[in-house]
Amino acid sequence: MTAKQAVQPLVGDQEARIYVYETTGGGASFINPVIKLKQGDIFQATLINQLSEDTIVHWHGLHVDWYMDGHPSYAVPQGASYKYHFTVQSRGGTYWYHPHPHGMTARQSYMGLSGFFIVEDRDDLNLRNSLDLKLGETDIPLVIQDKRLDEKGQPVYQPTEMEKFMGYEGDVIFVNLTANPVLEVRSRVYRFRLLNGSNARIYRLAFVKGGDNLPYYVIGTDGGLLDKPYRTSEIFVSPGERVDLLLDLRTFDTGEVITLKSLSFDPMHREEGGHGGHEGHGSSPVQAPKIGSGKEFHILKLVLKDRIPYDRTVPQSLSRIEAINTSGVSIRPITLAASGMQWLINGMSYQMDQYPITVKKNTTEIWEFRNQPNSMPHPMHLHGFMFQVIERDGSPEQVKKLAVDQLGRLVTDLGWKDTVLVWPGETVRIAIDFSHNFAGEQKLLTHCHVLEHEDQGMMLNYMVKRYGNKG
Ligand code: C2O
Ligand code: CU
Ligand code: CU
């Protein structure tokens, strides 16, 4: 995998300078390839850095030995390479990869570096067979990203100090690096694997037809399939999160158009209180994004090309999610708050060589993310281990009304997760089982997946070792 600059139009036919991962095989070259493996397979790759800056690849969501995880201390300079070799232990699911050099993750991702890493297990295979799904045709990975372009069609990444604090949002919405995307579909069931690969923007996703929000089934989260399909018509997806869903198009006629939209919501950015938006900060040649946070816009158009016979039924059961046993488990508070123009975790900013959290190997902990009421939404991510959301407290009204149980959880909280959105004023408890079979200490990260926040230091190292402490 070569990380390099490439020239490719983003909008219209104006050539844009972007960054890509390129691989070759069978005489062809692939840009940001979708990597697909089975659980138990061995994965090997060499990252070759042909960028003029340091980089390293992180396999977001995969359970791998820490030196295979793309920790920023392993970033390699221009011209150097890094070898990856690991067994895929993770459940079937939609994982992804992106750069992770400290302080440069946001810009490199924004310039184009990211791709899907799909793992298939037996449950996935069963679903594929029962619905007759085919990756790339009826099982479609879709990465949603927003960018700002200048008048020459070049992506612009020049966050002001305020935009580093609030997160950098764009005004052109891309799906798989395509602007104004249209997908031709047929009258059958589709699986969409949605990834929010944006630096900072949250989406409230709905499929809309003539003013109605269509029902769809959520079937999977960050770490693979749910126990069964959950019918819904809207979900929030924050940066780093994946949502796997089924959309049944059997009732539509040739020529009909269904739009995947982001519906409007309150972004709960506290700038709304006093700062009056993004205007007036710095002298960036590019205007503030025309699509403000939480505004409604189109993401993808589905056009029904023709009707076909299709008689499969959505299975009642998909997989098994065994709840992590949390009885008697200790709770570790993790506070999210700003100090001046900087977001901190437990009052700390990232230090590459410090491990403020130490966890004992093969034990379970509850981490309690506490977000301040006057904060902003933070999608909190953990490297190395998947977790389960066990409770949401103090959720804002727009979130609370989507809760599906007494614990305040959302549909997207019901499976294995590696990233969870914590809204202002919310306390979100997650259970993590730190069991692993790797040799030695594991040096991992927890951070906010608003990439500007991560780069600004809203990230901590944590260590998993045989003798932990309460940190
Ligand atoms: Cu996708 Cu450390 O992140
Ligand atoms: Cu990650
Ligand atoms: Cu954040």
Image (cartoon, rainbow, N blue to C red):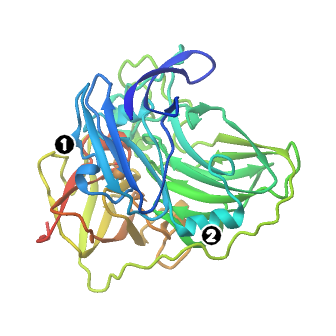
Residue 211 in percent (x, y) is at 77, 50
Quarter of the image with the C terminus in it: bottom left
Does residue 386 appear to the left or right of 24 in the view shown? left
Residue at the far front in the pictured view: 26
Q: In this view, does 163 lie above or below 334?
A: above
Quarter of the image with the N terminus in it: top left
- Which residue is pictured at 62% across the width and 16% down the height? 13
Residue 196 in percent (x, y) is at 50, 47
Q: What residue type is labelled 2?
A: Tyr
Beta carbon of the mark 1 residue lies under 8 A of ligand 1: no
Q: What element carries label 2?
A: strand
Badge number at residue 73:
1
- Per the image, the residue denoted by label 2 is 230
Does residue 409 appear to the left or right of 65 in the view shown? right
Does residue 29 appear to the left or right of 262 in the view shown? left
Q: In this view, does 429 lie above or below 119?
A: below
Q: Is mark 1 on a helix, strand or loop?
A: helix
Which quadrant of the view contains residue 314? bottom right
Q: Which of marks 1 and 2 is nearer the N terminus?
A: 1
- Which residue is pictured at 63% across the width and 70% down the height? 229
- Which residue is pictured at 60% across the width and 32% down the height? 178
- Which residue is pictured at 27% across the width and 50% down the height? 68
Q: Which amino acid does label 1 sit on?
A: Ser
Q: Are there few (<14), some (14-19), or many (20+) residues within 10 Å of tag 2?
A: some
Does residue 367 appear to the left or right of 467 in the view shown? right
